[in-house]
Image (cartoon, rainbow, N blue to C red):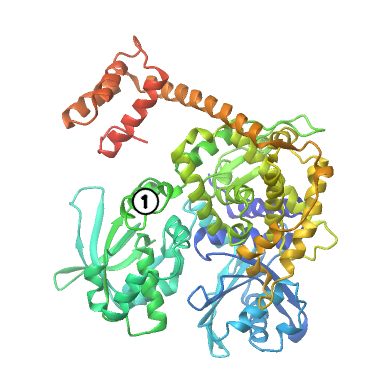
Amino acid sequence: MKYGIDEFHKSFMQDVWGAADVSRQFAESSFVEIFAEYLQDAGEIESFDYTPFRSNISRGLQIDGYSGDPADTEGVLTLVISDFNQEDSLLSLVKTDIERIFRKAERFLSFCLKDDFYVKLEESSPGYGLAQMINERKNLIRRVRMIMISNRILSERVYGMDAIEISSIPVTYNVWDISRLYRMVMSGKGKEDLDIDLSGDFNTSLPCLPAHLKGTEYEAYLTVVPGKLLADIYDRWGARLLEQNVRCFLQFRGKVNKGIRNTIQNEPEMFFAYNNGITATAEEVETSEVNGTKHITKIKNLQIVNGGQTTASIFTAHTKVKSCVSNLFVQMKLSIIDPDKTIEVVPRISEYANTQNKVNAADFFANHPFHIRVEQFSRRIYAPSPEGTFRESKWFYERARGQYLDAQSQLTPAQKKKFSQEYPRKQLFTKTDLAKFENVWERIPHIVSRGAQYNFAQYAKIVGVRWDADHDQFNEHWYKCIIAKAIIFKEMEKIVSSQPWYDGGYRANIVAYSIAKLADIASTKGKVIDFEKVWQRQALTQGLYDALVKISGAVHGVIINTPEGMKNVTEWAKKEGCWDRARKLEISIDKIMGNDFVSVRDSRQKNKEATKVQKIDNDVMAQAKVVNLGSEFWKSSLEWCRSKKIGSSKDIDIMLVATKIPAKIPSGKQSLHLMTVLEKMKEEGCPFVKD
């Protein structure tokens, strides 16, 4: 049986307390950061900057963070405010509480829109940077979204809050309570259901042509979407409409595509002819007959897997000139996908559909071989027991959101205790965590500072190229270095939080820049950190700890001392100029580090040796799979390939060997080749070849 809401709440709070303990920060800070990660994964927000602000003036002002600069988000300002309760039991969130908390955010916004407010704040405080940005962007802001996050349960008597205007700017409200988060996580989809009622909410429907045969599992429709309707839908649900990887990679494509923009502005009536349209998926549709023609009236969980830039461009044009998309139409191919097959089918649709703006590296979905390999390492490799302890444990890699909880959902209390000992919660890490751990050592802290999703997209670009070049470089030694980097990153968070100069702001930026600076210092000496030593200790050496303390103090000064004309520290940390300034810092750590460095040459030699071992492991695993499939499978495969005239003479020769199992066993090299034959057969639609 799945976790109930009570168990989920306890588990979530353990995450919060554990993160607070590990990073030495207030529990409320950990709560906001953890909750915000979920919202980013769900597409509710595209990025998140933690900028806590509290004031007792005018019956209280409060804000905890924001998502995106309105100048880059089509004038939408998203503000996040928290409602955190430290009680072990679940409490109810009632209407008066919601109104009281949102009023604090409203007052904060009202004050920020006044020219004399932010100038009175402490310039180094996170609140100052946000307040200044709001004030400077007030003429660009066309809408404000206020999101409340709470670890209480929303009362069933609360149905919502009416939108208001503050200084003529529309303000809308959204509440994410613990039960809403629970439903999203336990759905297994990592996102909340998105129901589009075309007839009820938009007073329209879409004439469609069924594009499937009756009685088959596959269901699809061809339709044409008016530009204004598409813009209105995107305005309401935003990036949640974009399949996660498309949403992630779109961030790299800059501003609106010029060709799309020019067509919208100058020849909107030709948009249908010039544009390739949209490829989308949904879990369900409702249809009705109108004058003998089928119309789509409702769509459940619409996801655009190709055409995200088209959609965003139409929306952008609509926000600037309301009438410019009224004569514009977009074709849409809509495939109905069973939720249980989403993780298998949607990546393929996205991969095959994204030909013009191909999403990099096979799109880096959760079932990409890279993530599967990291997961396999994490389930198999025990970390050495730290000094003073006797129990070995493992690090748990969560390649898909909710795996850690799901792994415990059917365990008895005794089994759960054993599981938590084998996989301590503090040793859980996700795809976006992995991207942070790695990219700081790539010396791009300004990219890491731009948010989890943006940073992950950059990481996918880097690793995708390396995986295609030689996936054996991602081996056991590499994995142990990853864990060492995770240990350094988590310890760096503690270090920053405990420094006398730390006042509660910009910790994520200071952590990223400090580690990147250490990597840069090592690189200039032709050296790298001895990650193997960190892995063996499962902790920092004293020298490494002291060096990071020294570096962090210097880096902190660079980050908070913004250049002329830029007072927002959070935005400054996202600029390459900030990293350029940090790189120029002269920091001597030779005496501190001692023998914590190894030469680049020695490091490469270890990687080379580990790559050879990985190749042998691949041979053994491939050989085992070939044997397990059995001679009858290979006889059928050989017959199918011959009937379809698929496969080279080499393919056929090696398959002939496999048909003689167990009398004759293909070699490791031959078995690896058979794996590529299986891939080829799968691509050609072989009915009995499964993943």
| Residue 315 in view, yes or no | yes
Where is mark 1, residue-wise?
Answer: 346
Q: Residues within 10 Å of mark 1 (few under 14, many from 20)?
A: some
At 45% across and 43% down in the image, what residue appears? Answer: 367
**Residue 132 at x, y percent in the picture:** 66, 80
- Residue 609 occupies quadrant: top right
In the figure, 569 relative to 532: above or below?
below
Secondary-structure class at tag 1: helix
Relative placement, left or right, of 332 versus 369 is left
**Residue 568 at x, y percent in the picture:** 67, 73
Outermost residue on the left side: it is: 292
The three-letter code of the residue at mark 1 reads Val
Relative placement, left or right, of 231 versus 171 is left
Relative placement, left or right, of 600 versus 208 is right
| Residue 395 in view, yes or no | no
**Residue 189 at x, y percent in the picture:** 46, 53
At 23% across and 62% down in the image, what residue appears? Answer: 222
In the figure, 244 relative to 112: above or below?
above
Q: Depth check: give the residue in front, 371 or 401.
A: 371
**Residue 395 at x, y percent in the picture:** 64, 39
Q: Depth check: give the residue in front, 198 or 552.
A: 552
Q: Depth check: give the residue in front, 271 or 210.
A: 271
